[in-house]
Image: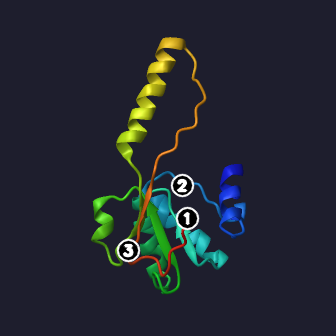
Amino acid sequence: MKDTKKHWKDAGLGFDKNLVREGNFLDDSGYRLAREILKENVTAIFCANDVMAISAIKAIKETGLSVPDDISVIGFDNTAIGNYIMPALTTVNAPLEHIAEACIESLKYFCEHKHFKQKEIRVKTDLIIRDSTKRALEF
């Protein structure tokens, strides 16, 4: 979480760990956590995947709020369905092939050496701006 704080600070934003919720990547947790975090008077929700983001949009609409006029929603993984919901989901596209290759390399290393070698792996992501955000910040 230390690196996350640095990125928020670099962007001129505050970081409040009390606004972070941990889900399980399934729609029920996206829905439940969105309902919970709406009590905090937030203006945007970033979800760990598109499934959670889509269910967060449902929760937001059920409370009578508008996406993106009242709350912006961003997902992560750029699944095809995100382009077809209303409003279309802003998301982060990550190169899953590169991430999978890095995981396989780590597993091979573990099988050969019986321990993991700590290694930072960075991949280029793209922000796919659609209709679920009123404005986008570039980090």
Callout 1 secondary element: helix
- Is 39 displayed left or right of 25 in the figure? right
- Is 136 displayed left or right of 85 in the figure? right
Asked if the residue at tag 1 contacts the one at tag 2, i.e. Cβ–Cβ closer than 8 Å, the answer is yes
Looking at the rendered structure, the kind of residue marked 2 is Gly
Q: Is residue 113 above or below residue 128?
A: above
Residue 130's disc number: 3
Residue 23's disc number: 2
Looking at the rendered structure, the kind of residue marked 1 is Leu
Looking at the rendered structure, the kind of residue marked 3 is Arg
Callout 3 secondary element: loop
Residue mark closest to the camera, 3 vs 1: 3
Callout 2 secondary element: loop
Name the N-terminal-most of marks 2 and 1.
2
- Please provide percent x and percent y for residue 139: 57, 64
Residue 33's disc number: 1
- Mark 1 neighbour class, 10 Å CA radius: few under 14, some 14 to 19, many 20 or more: many
Per the model, the C-alpha gap separating discs 2 and 1 is 7 Å
